[in-house]
Image: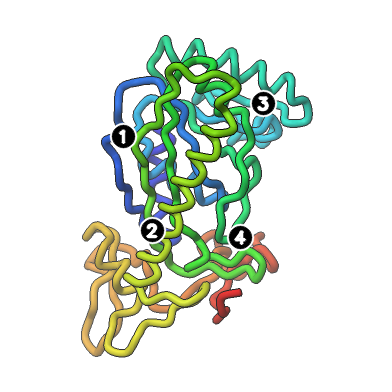
Amino acid sequence: MASKFCRLASPIVSIKWEVRGAEHMSADRAMVMVANHQSSLDILGMFDFWHIMDKCTVIAKRELFFAWPFGLAAWLSGLIFIDRRHPQRAQTAMNDSTKMLIKRRTKLWVFPEGTRRTTNEIHPFKKGAFHVAVRAQLPILPVVYSSYHTFLDDRNKVMNPGHVIVTALPPIETKGLTNDDIPELIERTRNAMIETFKATTKEVENRFNLSGHGITPAKGTATVISRIAAAMPSTVRTVSGGGGATVAPPGVTSFIEPEPRKIGSLIGGDASPIKEPTAYRRKDVQRD
């Protein structure tokens, strides 16, 4: 239910999620899914393809439980909360969860980097998720989000319409592995994810002629806004009107606009409680 409701948010903020390797996500078996962590938008992406994974739960930091009503909804949805300030307690909670994973053939989603970072790279992994996989002899399923740097710049508070390729790689089996094999398993998983991360990010850049965090289409090509709009379902995308203007289909609100807008305008215009610096604004930013 949460997934169906939250999927409506992606068209509103003009983000398109392209999923590859869905057959690996939909496998009816327990597994540990590990994904790179760039932003809170990762969760929005999860909601967009949650119906593919079906039975899945997520490891989340304990502090999120107290962020009601989200925390209550997360608890009712079966999220596993861990106390990162006490590693032993966190490890115990993850170990206890493996029995449920195997019994109910449920997938466990983990961000092994621990902290989200929009630095256009995949950082070293923590060992927790891999300990769980080896101990329970469950496969590791790597999931890779292409870089958000093509449309999101946290430092300068810039957010443009975006396209993200989410790739589920073939599962990596852990049968017969022991704790001594975990460092090599982590390295193998991370290397495979880095290779896919670079390839899919480059593909997005080339497909939409992107440069840095802005939108710089080559001469004679459509802008990324119009190209993403074309990829949207007909009920939510805009269409080209007379004189080159961008208009919504009759009776449908325009979710992709020809000009960028402040996130605050979605919740009440100038009276919105979201102010700078949290309000996102369009700005030309060159790649670092």
Q: How far apart are marks 2 and 4 (CA)?
A: 16 Å
Q: Badge 2: few (under 14), some or many (20 or more) residues near its Cα, within 10 Å?
A: some
- Relative height, residue 6 to residue 55 (above, below): below
Q: Name the residue under label 3.
A: 82
Expressed as whole percent of the image width and height from the top left, the position of residue 95 reads 59, 16
The residue lying at 24 percent from left, 57 percent from top is 233
Q: Nearer the viewer, mark 1 or mark 3?
A: 1
The reply to whether the C-beta atoms of the residues labelled 1 and 3 are less than 8 Å apart is no
Q: Which of marks 1 and 3 is nearer the N terminus?
A: 1
Disc nearer the start of the sequence (2/4): 4
The type of residue carrying mark 3 is: Ile
> Label for residue 119?
4
CB under 8 Å between discs 3 and 4? no
State the residue at coordinates (34%, 34%): 25
Which residue is tagged 2?
A: 200
The quarter holding residue 24 reads top left
Residue 57, given in percent of the width and then of the height, sits at: 48, 27
CA separation in Å, label 3 and label 4: 25 Å
